[in-house]
Amino acid sequence: MRKITERQLEALKAIEKHIKEKGFPPSYRELMKELSLKSTSSVKGLLDALRRKEYVTWEEGLPRTLKVVK
């Protein structure tokens, strides 16, 4: 795995927290709110970077399939 930025780490922790507390991954809007972002495209950018760096994965076109790769 490659090194991630502080913002990406914050997003990763928010994802892990949501999964631990609710049993399923957050939606883009939930992450947007949690991270105080202004748009879902910002969330998508963060998630795309985390996926490229192999910290998360998901199944395209299916909701709530976001998984943290350990």
Image (cartoon, grey):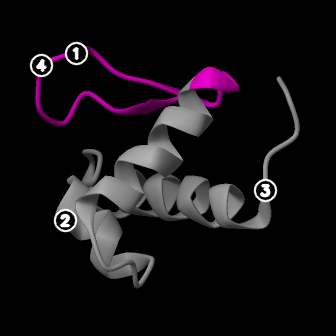
* Residue at image mark 4: 61
Is 69 or 43 nearer to us in this picture? 43
Q: Count residues near mark 3 (Cα–Cα under 10 Å), then give few for <14, some for 14-19, many for 20+.
A: few
| Identity of the residue furthest to the left in this view | 62
- Mark 3–mark 1 Cα distance, whole angstroms, equals 24 Å
Please, is residue 21 above or below residue 20 in the view? below
Q: Tell me the quadrant of the picture where the N terminus can be found.
A: top right
Q: CA distance from mark 2 to mark 1?
A: 17 Å
Please tell me the numbered disc located at residue 5: 3
Upstream in sequence: badge 2 or badge 1: 2
Q: Earlier in the sequence, mark 2 or mark 3?
A: 3
Residue under label 2, please give it.
Answer: 29
Residue farthest toward the right in the current orientation of the protein: 3
Query: Reading the chain from its start, which is encountered first: label 3 or label 1?
Result: 3
Q: CA distance from mark 4 to mark 3?
A: 27 Å
Report how far apart the C-alphas of labels 4 and 1 lie in the structure: 4 Å
Q: Can you say whether 38 is above or below 44 in the image?
A: below
- Give neighbour class at mark 4: few <14, some 14-19, many 20+ (Cα, 10 Å): few
For the residue labelled by badge 4, is the local secondary structure a helix, a strand or a loop?
loop
Q: Which residue is mark 1?
A: 60
* Residue type, label 2: Arg
- Lateral position of residue 33 relative to residue 16, left or right: left
Q: Assign a secondary structure to mark 3.
A: loop
Please provide the residue range marked out in magenta.
52-70
Image x and y of residue 63, in percent: 11, 32
Question: Disc 4 and disc 2: Cα gap in Å?
Answer: 16 Å
Identify which residue, 48 or 70, lies in the foreground: 48
Q: Which residue does the image show at 88% across and 39% down from the upper left?
A: 3
Q: Earlier in the sequence, mark 4 or mark 2?
A: 2
Tag 2's secondary structure? Answer: helix
